[in-house]
Each structure stands twice: as structure tokens, then as C-alpha cells.
Amino acid sequence: MKEELLQKIPEIDEIADADIREKTIAAFLDALTTGGWKVADLERIPFTLLIPNNPISLLAHTRAVTAVALKAAEILNEYYGAHFRIDRDILISGAILHDVGKLLEFAETPQGFRKSAHGRILRHPFSGNGLAAKHGLPAEVQHIIATHAHEGDDGFRTPASVVVHHADFMNFDPLRDLLK
């Protein structure tokens, strides 16, 4: 299952720190197993339930958010590196895992994809953060997951969390408006 995940999300291999890379993989695999999914399902699971008949997969969304976040961080590090630096490994792990909790939040039913019993009481930033903590990922990665959505709007966000938050909504907002 690990090799299949690495084929689907090759950005995982861009995490230079072996410990963070392995813990990122472990958290993702745990979410798949706990949610009752297979790696191949990532191409079928919609990235959001807020867009009816959403054709964009969780896999495509995760990879797109990671790509946008990486480009943004590269530019911010170039121009503002004297003031702050965004750690690439933390950013990649957080971007890859930002929606991992959706593997617990969503369920497939005969009527299509819906909120699971778990998802009706815990949104994905909470369950994703729990998975990251369970697998010993750094607090900075947990912070990205916990604050990437609206749950983080009234609190502090690190520069990496700001980047993933905006990368996520840059990928969501245009699709929400176009796919209505």
C-alpha cells in the first residue's frame, strides 16, 4: 500500500527529512485504513461535498494544493527570507495531509459520497490533526492541518499555514463557482 501511495502522491518523496516523510506516509495510510478506503479510491473520492456532482478528486486536489503551496513558498522565501523562512519539509507534509481527515469525514453510500458518522461530529481539520499527532509529526505540521480551513480564521497561522490555507482556497473557490 505504501508504494501505491508514493506512486499516486510522488510529492511525498520531496520531503527530505526521512522521519517527517515516514510519519507523513504513516498518517496517510492510517487514514485510508481507518476510513475503509484503498489508495485507488483517492481518484474517486471527491475533494469536497460542497459542490454537487463534484468531478475533482481528493487526489487531484491534494496534489494541486501541494504544488501551489510549494511555488508560493519558494517565492516568499526568495523575497522575504531575511524575515522568515518556510520550511519545505513541513510545508509539503502539511499540504499533503491538509485534507487527510476527509478519509474519516466522508463515506461512500449507495446514494453517493456523504458525511460519515465520524464526519457529522468532527470535521477533517480535527481528525487530520489527530492523525498527525498520533504519528508524531511536528507541531508545525499539525498546525497547518488544524488551521488550513475556516477553523483557523480567528487564530494565529504560521507562514506555512497561511500558504497552505490560501493554496487550498485558490483551488476550491474557482471550482465552487465554475462547477455549480
Image (tube, rainbow, N blue to C red):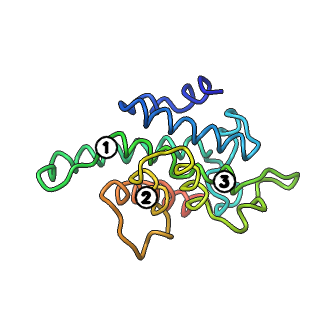
Mark 3 or 2 closer to N-term?
Answer: 3
Q: Which amino acid does label 2 sit on?
A: His
Residue sitting at 73 percent across and 40 percent down?
Answer: 37
Q: In this view, does 142 lie to the left or right of 42?
A: left
**Residue 54, disc:** 3
Circle nearer the viewer, 3 or 1: 1
Secondary structure beneath label 3: loop
Which disc is residue 143 wearing? 2
Mark 2 neighbour class, 10 Å CA radius: few under 14, some 14 to 19, many 20 or more: many
Please provide percent x and percent y for residue 2.
Answer: 60, 27
Residue 71, label in figure: 1
Q: Residue at x 35, y 55 (%)?
A: 163
**Going 57% across and 48% down the picture, which residue do you hit?**
134
Q: In this view, does 157 lie above or below 13?
A: below
Looking at the image, do the residues carrying marks 3 and 1 touch, with CB atoms under 8 Å apart?
A: no
Q: How crowded is mark 1: few (under 14 residues within 10 Å), some or many (20 or more)?
A: few
